[in-house]
Image (cartoon, grey):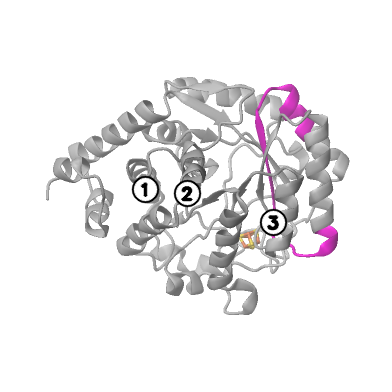
Amino acid sequence: MSISKILEKDILSGEDIITLLSSRDENRTLLFKKSAEIKEKIIGKKVWFRGLIEFSNVCSKDCLYCGIRKGNKNLKRYSLSDEEILTAAKFAYDNLYGSIALQSGELESPVIADRIENLIYKIKALSKGELGITLSVGEQNPEIYQKWFEAGAHRYLLRIEATNESLYRKIHPGNKKHDFRRRLECLKSLQDIGYQTGTGVMIGLPFQTMDDLASDLLFMKEFNIDMCGMGPYIEHADTPLMIYAADLLPLKERFDLTLKMIAIIRIMMKDINIVAATALQAIDPVGREKAIKIGANIIMPNITPGRYRDSYKLYDNKPCTDESAEDCQSCLEARVSLADSEIVYGEWGDSQHYDKRRKSI
Ligand code: SF4
């Protein structure tokens, strides 16, 4: 079937998605034109900020692709103090960011759970309830998710990274701590509790096929996610997956596939929030602008204190690790306007999909 015919369909099959992912030249342009039109019609030219606070790079897990995995001994570990986290949140509030995202390595303990709960209450208090809070702190028990939700966090990003269980097992150690089923259960409990629930995958992983990528998008549609964060896989020198570096697609192709994945998910799920991932900029200096043009509507300025940023490298060549939060904001303002869009200040920018999904329950 021609690309034009596929783009007219209401529901895309796996085969359609693979055809779109393989599109080149004018067919690729048609795909991006369609996704950009949908974005403009449903979301407009708006882009919302999530001020990103990477508050600790300590992690109990050992994902084989990740630069801050527990087994990486070449990394200086850090944890921000409560005061540093609250100062960063205050910066976001004072600069009308609308929302923050608290992100860290994955740790499960009552002490950490209580600490995060207290921080959520304090952030809500210092912003008079106005700052939206996204959490991205991994797998936890449902009771913990519930406590954090009641404290005021309302969005949660838990990337599945690969929805094909056999691929998932190839990029994670084979033990109970890295259990595909548990990750799915966690996503489900987040959704059941009432979070705006986000997930995403890496694109260009070793062993990954076009079929896998198509299934990833079908999974997201089927799961009825509210938010999507996808980025190209970029290898990190201090990780076990590095031994496959020579077999990977060239970075430019991983980048191109990521843009196509973003365009296709925008076509499949018109009203969700989609992040323009920082990893895109690690490959192409205007990578995030390109993502915004063809479908993304969320950008995450890094407001982690600058001296820690170099130590939160999930992948090599991570951009913007030497900027202050102020530099980051003005750089992103320029970038977003280059993409013919505008940042909306002082709003949460919630997923429209979430509102509709909740009303239909
Ligand atoms: S991907 Fe997440 S859970 Fe896995 S090692 Fe990295 S920070 Fe930890």
- The secondary structure type at the circle numbered 3 is helix
State yes or no: Cβ of the residue under disc 1 lies below 8 Å from any atom of ligand 1: no
Residues under labels 2 and 1: Cα distance? 8 Å
Q: Given the current orientation, which residue lies at the most extreme left position?
A: 1
Secondary structure under badge 1?
helix
Q: From what the image shows, is residue 70 above or below residue 131?
A: below
Which mark identifies residue 261?
1
Q: Quadrant of residue 34?
A: top left
Disc 3, disc 2: CB below 8 Å? no
Q: Residues within 10 Å of mark 3 (few under 14, many from 20)?
A: many
Residue bearing mark 3: 145
Q: Earlier in the sequence, mark 2 or mark 1?
A: 2
Amino acid on which disc 2 is placed: Met
Q: Residues within 10 Å of mark 1 (few under 14, many from 20)?
A: many
Q: How many C-alpha atoms fall within 10 Å of the one at disc 2: few (<14), some, or many (≥20)?
A: many
Residue at 39% x, 51% y is 254
Amino acid type at image mark 1: Met
Q: Secondary structure at mark 2?
A: loop
Which segment did they paint magenta?
88-112
Q: Which residue is mark 2?
A: 230
Nearest to viewer (mark 3 / mark 2): 3
Q: Position of residue 17 (x, y in %)?
A: 27, 53
Residue 267 in the image: x percent, y percent? 32, 41
Proximity of marks 1 and 3: CB atoms separated by less than 8 Å: no
